[in-house]
Image (cartoon, helix red, strand yellow):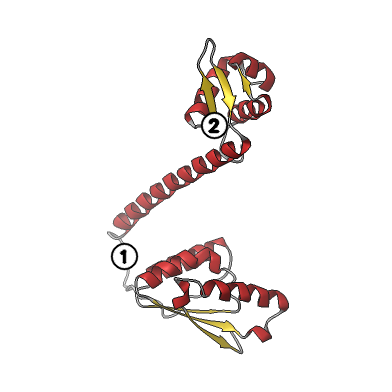
Amino acid sequence: MEMGLNEYQALALAHLLFMGEAKPLALSRASGVPSARIYDVLDELTRMGLVLVRPGRPSIFVSLTPEEVADKLVALGVKELERKVRMLREQANKLVRMADQIYLRGGRATHTVPLLRIVGVGNASLAETRRLYDMAREEILIMSRAMEYLPNVADCLARALDRGVSVRVILMKPELLSNEDRAKQAKTLKALKQPPLDEVLIRFSDEVP
């Protein structure tokens, strides 16, 4: 259920995995899914590609292997996430079109681009970091002790480099870090030596604010 199935779908699929194959009414009795719903539930699972059907009177439903079921559920989840992302982008574009009509119309303020943007920690700040990297047109300047968050933004940095953006990073000198942070930094440095991130210019400092 945590991978996107409702209760009846999960019950039917779990018991079919246990039984290997079953007729609808037999699966209904074993799983507790009402007989009035079992046919619809099995049709839903079939459309999702999670079970196979062997024609007959009545049809026999056959379980995939656990690995196949897991892969199918992941693929379905990714597809749903992509749909939600497309919907969010459409809404975001709509928001920009509408908000542009009123932006700064009611006051005397003017739009300015901040010289420095400070980004903290957490998921929201990570999203902001990715957005800033995607916005960059000329250069990205990064100061970080170990830059352990690199795996979460590597794709954005790669796209920036592909656009011709200069990326320069200042890290804390390894000998000034704790053993834990030094290990994190070592992973970061290893990743930055792999293409296309090997174009990033790295320097070290005694202090990183």
* Callout 1 amino acid: Gly
Are dots 1 and 2 in contact, CB under 8 Å? no
Q: Residue placed farthest to the left in the image?
A: 101
Using a 10 Å C-alpha cutoff, classify the residue at mark 2 as few (fewer than 14 neighbours), some (14 to 19) or many (20 or more).
many
The image shows residue 16, relative to residue 72, as above or below, that is above
**Residue 141 placement (x, y as % from top left):** 46, 80
Q: In this orientation, which residue lies closer to the viewer: 117 or 39?
A: 39
- Identified at 39% across, 70% down, the residue is 160
* Number of numbered discs overlaid on the protein picture: 2
Q: In this orientation, which residue lies closer to the viewer: 12 or 23?
A: 23
Viewed as shown, does residue 30 lie left or right of 124? right
**Residue 27 placement (x, y as % from top left):** 64, 19
> Is the N terminus in the top left, top right, bottom left or bottom right quadrant?
top right
Q: Which callout, 1 or 2, points at the residue further toward the start of the chain?
A: 2
**Residue 38 placement (x, y as % from top left):** 57, 19
> Is the C terminus in the top left, top right, bottom left or bottom right quadrant?
bottom right
Viewed as shown, does residue 104 lie left or right of 85? left
Q: Does residue 197 appear in the picture of this structure?
A: yes
**Residue 138 placement (x, y as % from top left):** 35, 77
Tag on residue 50? 2
- Identified at 67% across, 22% down, the residue is 31
Which tag is nearer the camera, tag 1 or tag 2?
2
> What residue is pinned by disc 1?
106
Q: Indicate the secondary structure of the residue bearing disc 2.
A: loop
Q: Indicate the secondary structure of the residue bearing disc 1.
A: loop
- Identified at 62% across, 86% down, the residue is 173
- Distance CA(mark 1)–CA(mark 2): 55 Å
